[in-house]
Image (cartoon, rainbow, N blue to C red):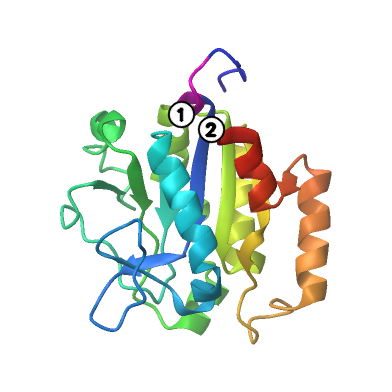
Amino acid sequence: MAAMDGKRPLNRRLALFDTDCLEVADENSVRSAQLPGFGIRPRVQPLADKLDRLYAFARRHDLTMVFTQCCSARAVAPGAHPEVLVVPMDPSDRGWMDRVDRFRLINIQKHSAAPLHESFICRHFDMFQHNANARRLLEILDIPRWVLFGHGFDLCVDSAVKGIVAAGYAAHVLTDVIASSAAGYGPYGTPESKRLILEYLVKIGVTTGELNAFLGEHDR
């Protein structure tokens, strides 16, 4: 992992990881004001203003933003959005690797065809378990600190944070830009679940904070 170096530009020190907030828009979507062609998933629509502040911040500073999509979302088809690089699930597909530096927006594919309860049992929400190219992407980017937020905190965000930490990078969770997982999937989706997960993440070195403090620190 590259060392944190204050002399490096912000976009080489910091990147965003959006977990499952976005899907390809249709006529019924609540659209992102900052990302044409994308809608905001229903469970995070109350966070739409905060999300668009983050997306605008990333654009102003030319930050890389990696994003995943819920297993039930309308997925990004490779090549359908010229501004987005899609990282495929097939570990033998390496054609995307030499194009990483041309893109600011990068989508990590997840399983999307199985029924939701089957996806839960198989942990399809864990992009680092099922997409070997996810870790390769982090290594190619080699950005030391990742700021995470999103939908499905107990499962999807949690697995993204742990995957980043396991790869040797620092993770910071925006606690006011997360939505808990839906109920009905094990013991998740409750305030107690959120509290216990956050406590564990802090124990393994993850930092936490709120959006205004984060923007106040970096958006000067």
Judged from this view, the residue extending furthest toward the bottom is 184
Name the one closer to the observer, 179 or 136.
179
Element type where label 2 sits in the image: strand
Residue in the foreground of this view, choosing between 69 and 51: 51
For this view, does 191 lie left or right of residue 7? right
Determine if residue 58 is in view: yes
Residue receiving disc 1: 11
Under tag 1, what secondary structure?
helix
Residue 5's place in the image compared with 152, above or below, is above
Q: Residue at x 67, y 61 (%)?
A: 176
Q: Residue at x 59, y 59 (%)?
A: 157
Which kind of residue does numbered mark 1 sit on? Asn
Seen as rendered, the residue at the extreme front is: 220
Are the residues flagged by discs 2 and 1 in contact, CB closer than 8 Å? yes
Position of residue 110 measured from the top left corner of the image (x, y, whole percent) = 40, 61
Where residue 4 sits in the image (x, y, percent)?
62, 20
Question: Does the magenta portion include 9?
Answer: yes
Q: Quadrant of residue 95?
A: top left
Q: Magenta region's main secondary structure?
A: helix
Report the quarter where the C terminus lies.
Answer: top right
Marks 2 and 1, how far apart in space? 5 Å
Which residues make up the magenta segment?
Answer: 8-12
Quarter the N terminus occupies: top right
Nearest to the observer: residue 102 or residue 214: 214
Give the residue number, with chain letter if any, for mark 2: 14
Question: The disc labelled 2 sits on which kind of residue?
Answer: Leu
Residue 71, percent from left and from top: 42, 71
**Residue 171, placed above or below residue 43:** above
Locate residue 60 relative to residue 178 in the image: left or right: left
Q: Residue at x 40, y 38 (%)?
A: 60
Number of residues whose C-alpha sits closer than 10 Å to that of mark 2, classed few (under 14), some (14–19) or many (20 or more)? many
